[in-house]
Image (spheres, rainbow, N blue to C red):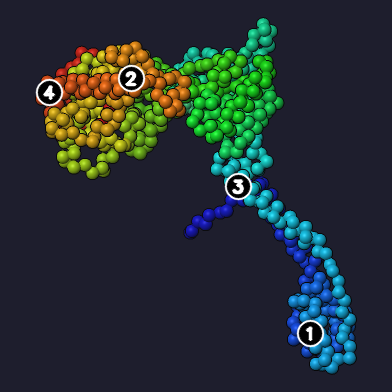
Amino acid sequence: MENKPIAPPPNGNQKRLFFWFYLVILFFLVTQGSLTGTYRTTETNWNDLENKMLAEEDIAQMIVVNKERVEITLKSEPLAAGKYPDFRSNSRGPHYFLTIGSVEAFESRLLSIQDKHDLAQLPEVRYVTRTNWLRSIFSWLLPFIIIIAIWYYIFARIGRRGGMGSVNPFDFGKSRATLFDDANQSKHSFEDVAGLEEAKAEIQEIVEFLKNPDRYTYLGAKIPKGVILVGPPGTGKTLLAKAVAGEAQVPFFHLSGSEFVEMFVGVGASRVRDLFRKAKDKSPSIIFIDELDAIGRARGNSLSMRANDERESTLNQLLTEMDGFGTNTGVIVMAATNRADILDKALLRPGRFDRHIYLELPNLEERKAIFEVHLKPLRLAKDIDVELLAGQTPGFSGADIANICNEAALIAARQRKEAIDMQDFSSATDRIIAGLEKKSKIISKEEKRIIAFHEAGHATVSWFLEHGDELMKVSIVPRGKSLGSAWYLPEEHQLFTKGQLTDKLCMALGGRAAEDLIFNEISSGALDDLEKVTKQAYSMVAFYGLDEKLGHISFYDSTGQSDQSLHRPYSEATAQIIDEEVRNLVNEAYQKAIAILKDHRTELESLAGLLLDQEVANRDDLVEIFGERDRTQPQQALLANG
Ligand code: ATP
């Protein structure tokens, strides 16, 4: 049987819209009818008027209305005799109407009919002017109704497109925050947040304040007005804020910075005002603004001033509101951002967001804890080793780990397994690092040889470099956009020496160097590597002050203002030195890679051969070809795409 889609029932706003629509139509019909009387009279023509009504003297009266229309009332006798079957004998006139061009033409035609039919007398003709006031009002109102309808429609569409759900244009300046309160409680608690112990401890203090404010105010302590969570994407900022909502048991207003800003000037500021008003009404309460950078960017440093007016006025309003309530009003503003460096300084000063909590990518122990949280709801096989999983995922954020767990479950389900095993996690990790395998990609034999040597080049160079990362696996199975990949486990460093960074350049250039050495020709396959190398070399010279010729100088601008500036903060001569030194650095690294490959050409060729045979070389294959490396600190898996 065919399933017909069922139209959803109209919601409240649609019903209201229909109501107004029907009312307008009804109004129109009523005014039309009552003014013209068309529902009682029947239109006639000159022929009937002349030959039937006038010739037979059946007309009692003719009324010329507004010089354009004649209303004809018949005598009662012909009606009673049934000469006009459209009307009953006792029906009151006017019975017919006729539209005339002009009064003069009408009169002269009447006279000529009188002559023609030799009539003794014409019926009585009266002239009246009627003001159709309802129609006049309506013709005034109609344009307004149309304009309002269009206005309503546009606002409703914007509302829906912005995901705001409301179609009421009068709510446009109201805040769109989601409210978690007794009726709609946040389901998160601090238990869902793994690791982040320091951040949790700080945040817990705020929760405590909201629960027992007297304990703090009794001693005269002031609680921070604003708390800003700063950290890379996916490190759990939003999760932490939601956990606060769940734990604090106070109303929690959650919205994203971008929800303040619309294309209409003034809307953002009005939404900020509305949000703070609502929060104060429900005090003690928490406001959480996610992605604060959408409105909190430093003011007045943009190239396009006009485009920023709305954002700036929103920010100004936010600054004003945060000043406007005292520390003990019980409203705490929390915010999250990935980029505290570009935020306006006024926002970060004490008295506004005075407490800054920095979240970082999780370390080994924290990753283990995050895995444990996300493994809990999964059906796992006995071979799952959380320690190993955490070890294989350095540089991963909490969101990445949550994603791996879900991906592993999907992979296991696809294979109809009873439980998720280590192999599924390994496939999920590979997939998340390198993208989906694309075995169907058509690659010629010659291209495959180039890719195999390219990847083997990365592997060989990294294996024999002093600071080369630990290599775990090499593959020439295309994944995502890349044609081959090498998996590394870099050590978790806070600092990098010049030697370490130079070795990274060398590793990245290993693929191209191998192509050069083996085929005497280079290909376009090193695009990713070269992009990485160029950026890193520029950072080393211009930012980290690692170049001898340029000296201990850094052009890094942590405020982000230089991104928007048209002027370089250095001279043409310095620019030339930077370019030259970057080129030297890259060339040296390239020569070093070539030298290593020349020294270990046999190993390079046997790894490439193995890759051409079986597409993937595991750690054991690598050890067999290159021999054991003396450094064993596997910690972090990164990928060098070929
Ligand atoms: P963004 O800056 O991109 O908004 P975020 O820092 O706000 O990112 P969240 O949205 O909080 O990141 O995290 C995304 C998901 O990652 C969470 O829903 C959760 O599943 C997982 N996650 C992140 N950090 C943790 C953690 N410490 N413990 C448990 N799960 C975590």
List the residue tagged with mark 1. 109
List the residue tagged with mark 2. 574
Relative to 82, does residue 378 appear above or below in the rendering?
above
Circle 4/circle 2 CB separation < 8 Å: no
Seen at 66% across and 26% down, the residue is 276
Q: Amino acid at mark 2?
A: Thr
Task: Find residue 154 and name its label.
Answer: 3
Q: Amino acid at mark 4?
A: Lys
Q: Amino acid at mark 1?
A: Arg
Circle 3/circle 4 CB separation < 8 Å: no
Residue count near mark 3 (Cα–Cα under 10 Å), binned few <14, some 14–19, many ≥20? some
> Depth-wise, is mark 3 or mark 1 nearer the camera?
1
Q: Cα distance, mark 4 to mark 2? A: 36 Å
List the residue tagged with mark 4. 598
Residue farthest to the top?
A: 219
> Depth-wise, is mark 1 or mark 4 nearer the camera?
1
Seen at 65% across and 43% down, the residue is 168
Q: Amino acid at mark 3?
A: Ile
Which numbered disc flags the more N-terminal residue, 3 or 1? Answer: 1
Q: Position of residue 428 (x, y in %)?
A: 34, 31
Seen at 83% across and 79% down, the residue is 72
Which numbered disc flags the more N-terminal residue, 3 or 4? Answer: 3
